[in-house]
Image: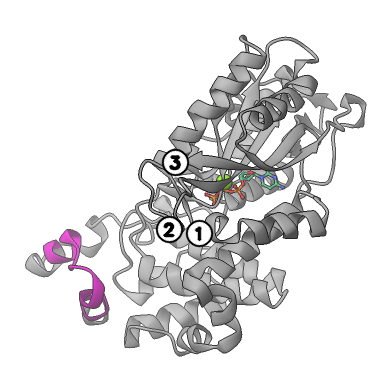
Amino acid sequence: ISWFTESMSAGRPVSVEIRHYIQNPAVDQRSCAHPSAKPESAVSPYACQRRTTLDNHNKIFTDALEVLAENLELCGNQGPSLAFRRAASMLKSLPAALRRLEETQHLPCLGEHSRAIIEEISECGSSSRVEEILNDERYRTMKFSQGNSSHIFFRQCKSLVCHSISYSSALVAGFLFYEDISKPVSRTEASALKIIVEEAVICVNPSATVSITGGFRRGKEFGHDVDFIIKTPEAGQEDVILPAVIKRFKSQNILLYSDLQESTFDLRKLPTHCFEAMDHFSKCFLIIKLKREQETDARAGKDWRAVRVDLVAPPLERFTYALLGWTGSTLFLRDLRRFARLERGKLLDNHALYDKATNTFLPAKTEEDIFAHLGLEYIEPWQRNA
Ligand code: DCT
Ligand code: MG
């Protein structure tokens, strides 16, 4: 365990569990319950069969693997990048820090490259390849210039473009509010936005409700945007609510940018086989002016910041699938769909769950119903941080 205590002592105190082990050398190693120690407590290769909270005990490894993944993404190598993301995600789900390299032997999602990185960090405290990337001009320009904001801006543009908004209008909005939208949104700011969105939605339709989704529903303290899902009990209301909400934001003078995507949802076209694509629900991508508590901006008179907000309004009978999809994380959902298809012969997306064996759609009133249909233990939103 020397590599561990050495590498950990740099940034964090040695964990209680390690101290316990040091103080009780006679303790049978196998009785120190560690997920990788015993085959019967094997870690699943699917993120949807793991509970991944924000309490990451292997940050020293996952940070490094995510740098590698991010660098590959910036170079357009999505496949190899995903392998590093999967490795990091699996390590995040472990209930304790890795103590010995041998513990990785029974762990899934670790390819030759990920293992080599773990080994090097175990022995030297850092990875030379990761250090190289962190010092690389290109990577630094993307990630660190102007206080870490370019990277987030890049993500913002990527996210707007993913949502198939025209590049030019997204870029114009991105540049206009660059400084603000490149700063992370806090949970407090997300709660303030929820009040604003709720007020507008209820004003337009008193029977509609608003729930926060995305990272904040999973318990994150910061996000790059705030995601909301709107539930309308009357059929057809989902198509008219978003234009009305946008109109209200405009009249309140808090709308800085909006892109409304009208619903292209068609029940007859289900099941879709295109799982990575955006869903067909009515949705909008907004930049909203959020009043600050204190005027912290250097430029006098600016008592607000710009925040990216996504709203989605699915038809009532699609709500549960949409809620599950919009809660993420992206990797958790990717694996849930993959598991459904490969292990259960079912097709899951943000619109429906379809059983290929019986050619039927499986109904779900709650997220628990979807997990039950898939024969999976229920995973709470705060355990979906894969
Ligand atoms: N999503 C989806 N279909 C897509 C893309 C995303 O259903 N094609 C879901 C996955 C997560 C959710 O939408 C919100 O997306 P993000 O805001 O990008 O993710 P996040 O987890 O909320 O991240 P952050 O906290 O940084 O906002
Ligand atoms: Mg989000």
Q: CA distance from mark 2 to mark 3?
A: 27 Å
Answer whether residue 380 is visible to the viewer in this image: no
The residue drawn where x is 76% and y is 56% is 161
Q: CA distance from mark 3 to mark 1?
A: 27 Å
> Where does residue 54 sit, x and y in percent of width and height?
39, 50
In the shown orientation, is residue 95 left or right of residue 201? left
Residue identified by numbered label 2: 92
Q: Secondary structure at mark 2?
A: helix
Classed neighbour count for the residue bearing mark 2: other residues with Cα under 10 Å, few (<14), some (14–19), many (≥20): many
Answer whether residue 107 is visible to the viewer in this image: yes
> Where does residue 335 sit, x and y in percent of width and height?
63, 49
Name the residue furthest left. 23
> Where does residue 256 sit, x and y in percent of width and height?
65, 44
| Three-letter amino acid code at the position of disc 1 | Ser
Q: Secondary structure at mark 3?
A: helix
- Determine whether label 3 and label 1 are within 8 Å by CB: no
The residue drawn where x is 54% and y is 52% is 224
Q: In front: 152, or 373?
A: 152
- Magenta stretch, residue numbers: 4-20
Residue identified by numbered label 3: 189
Residue identified by numbered label 1: 89
Label 3 vs 1, first from the N-terminus:
1
Tell us which disc is closer to us: 3 or 1: 3
**Magenta residue check for 357:** no
The residue drawn where x is 58% and y is 80% is 141
Occupied quadrant, residue 182 = bottom right
